[in-house]
Image (tube, grey):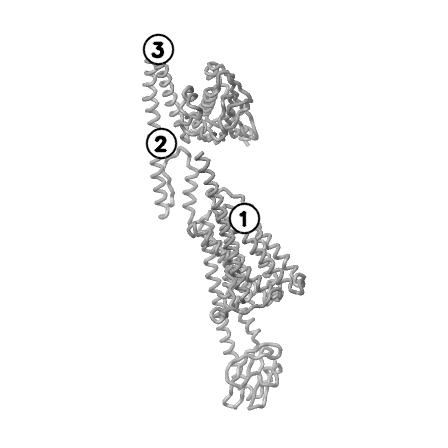
Amino acid sequence: MFLNSVVLILQETLEAALLISVLLVFMRLRCIRPFWIISAIAAGSAGAYFFALQMASISEWFDYMGQEVVNASIQLTVLLILAIFVAQNPGATHSTSKPQKDLGVIICTLLLVALSLTREGSEVFIYISGVIGHPSHAQPTLTGSGIGAGIGISAGVLIYYGLLGLPTKWIALSGLLLLSLVGGNMASQATQLLTQADWLPYSKILWDSSDGLPENSILGHLLYALFGYEATPSLLQVFSYIAGMLLISLCAHLGSRKISFSTDQKTTDHNASVNR
Amino acid sequence: MKSIRVFLLASILAILTLFNFVAALQGYQSSLLEAEKLFDSQLLQTAKLIANLYVDNTTSNLNYLSTHAYQVWHDDQLLAASNNAQSEAITDRYPGFGYANFDGYRWRTLAYFDHNHDNWIIAAERTDLRFILAESVITKAVLPIVLGIPLVGLLIWLIIGRGLKPLRDLSDQLKNKQVNDLTPVETPELKDELSQVVQSINVMIRRLGTTLEREKRFTSDAAHELRTPISALKIQLHNLEEDIPVDNESFAQLQSGVERMQHLIEQLLSLYRSTPDEFSSHFTSVNLYQLAQDVIAEQHLIFEGKNQTLALEGSNNVIEGNAFTLSTLLQNLLSNANKYTPTGGSILVSVDENNNHICLKVEDSGPGIAPSDYGKVLERFQRLNNKSEVIATQGCGLGLTIVQHIADLHHADLSISPSSFASGTAFSILFKKAPNPDEKRI
């Protein structure tokens, strides 16, 4: 129970902590108050509770594949919102410390945090409420959950301060790289769930690294939570992982080009008016 | 990293938690392995015990142990077994440990050969119970690490707070320093890390004091050294006026130049005098309406000279400020309006209350200023109108800079907009209203 609790809670917490810490860094760069993230965490926790309560009936949807399909839909929605988020060039810093009312970035951040927490949190709720009913399991479950959550949150805090400690020009780039890995992870997990639900065909296993780095080892679980590590990934999973990463990278690139183009345009207009 | 204390607490606690919890996990896994060895050793002792007990035919005493099972085999004959053991051999009769599934559970098994009686003793123990027992013992050891983290966090928070106290004291001392207090910063408990900072601040304060002293001396010297020769020059010009024809253009230009030089010096000195923060530390209650009346009474002649209409509107409104600088502000605004309003034009001064603010406004019916030039008029030595007008009007481009400066000293906002006349400019200064004397007492 103890180890199972550690692994499950660590996976869910670490996945959420990675996303939230990177989003917090971008909000810091945009001078947006972290109040929005706190509200999103509260909304996500409430969402997770209600999602967990409804899980029994949701599971019966789509020929008893409701849980897989709904979770995959949430992950694909998160991927889409992540793409919209990076397309707004969230790493563009403002010289002024005045809070920027950038509605698009705020809405994307709220949705990303709330949706991710709803999905991850519901699994935690279901697990803990299922296990804690047995008195002999309560102590190891709660201790394991505490350790899992502690490691996940600590990793998130260190990622946050680690990113902020980088030279300014590398902060946004590193954040976008992490977000592209999160995007790849979301796409890969969604593909796996849809394959389980028979919505996508099974494809051949590309490699087997379970001898070198088994999925059920601590490092394997950590890498799964952070980057969606699979010891035996299918062709479709690898393809969707790369597609997810490319989508985020492309949107980030287009977002930064759009900003630099409009800046160039303004500079040209200004020069033209000065010359007149 | 807005707060050093939060940054240190979060990062130290995160590193501590990460290392402690990962170490606890590692400890848990190692302890489980050790517990497994211990349980195996116990199982071996149980098997040996059964071997000895069987000789005494008392093995039935062990039947109450539902967590354990055993069989005693001699060749292929089952000599004895616990109630929960099956009739077939639980495991192969090769010496050593293994696993088997029976009776609805998974069991850890041991095949032990008793050389004294040529019997095989097979002992088994339920793995789930072993695991629960081991986990219960180990998690009890891990629990204090988890529960201790909030306490550790609290201690770190307090220790960092204590460590940063000298920095906070220094910050408070600097924040509470009066604007005219140029005494060195003193901290009773100076830490090594802060001594260099305090030394640098004190050196800076000393330099600032020297610079301010030098500037004060310069003002005093300049006031004396510059005003005296100009006054002498003006007397000489006055004497010359009787000997030189009235229409002598060069003489008129010389007179105008001397006037402009005197004005420039007065404005420069006035600008300097309103710069030091010490003015703002000696604010008194000033009735802006009465002040405007006084300034207008002093200056009405220059408006009459250009046949301009000067009106004052509003009511008694009191602000906290410095009467001398405020009259300079109003003089400059009126002088500016007078210069740029054509002969026969109108100037309106108003003092109104608006949402706990007092608005002093000076409007003229002059040519006005293009909105794109609003920022430029406040720059030093800026005169925006065309050259002929600039030559015609006496000024040095410092008046509105001084107005802006005085407004800043009073924490007031200066804004420029078109006037309510058909053309012209309105200069509005929004002051905070002085608190009601009754409110002050509360």
Residue where numbered disc 3 is placed: B241
How many numbered circles does the render carry? 3
Q: Which residue corresponds to the image point at 34% horizontal and 24% vertical from the top-left?
A: B220
Q: CA distance from mark 1 to mark 2?
A: 49 Å
Query: Callout 1: residue from which chain?
Result: A
Question: Can residue B14 be spotted in the picture?
Answer: yes
Tell me if B53 is positioned left or right of A50 in this view.
Answer: left
Residue at left 36%, top 19%? B257
Amino acid tagged 2: Leu
- Residue B221 position, x and y percent, is 32, 24
Kindly identify the amino acid type of the residue bearing the numbered disc 3: Glu
Which amino acid type corresponds to the residue marked 1 in the rendered image? Val
Give the secondary structure at mark 1.
helix
Secondary structure at badge 2 equals helix
Q: Residue B316: where, in percent of width, then height?
A: 54, 22
Closer to the camera, B275 or A82? A82
Is residue B159 visible to us here?
A: no
Query: First in sequence: mark 2 or mark 3?
Result: 2
Q: Position of residue B158 (x, y in %)?
A: 46, 51
Per the model, the C-alpha gap separating discs 2 and 3 is: 42 Å
The residue singled out by tag 2 in the image is B212
Q: Residue at x 55, y 69 (%)?
A: A204
Tell me which residue sits at (62%, 55%) in the image.
Answer: A47
Could you say which disc has been placed on residue A105 in the image? 1
Mark 1 or 2: the one toward you? 1
Position of B247 relative to A71 (above/below): above
State the image quarter where residue B174 is shown.
top left
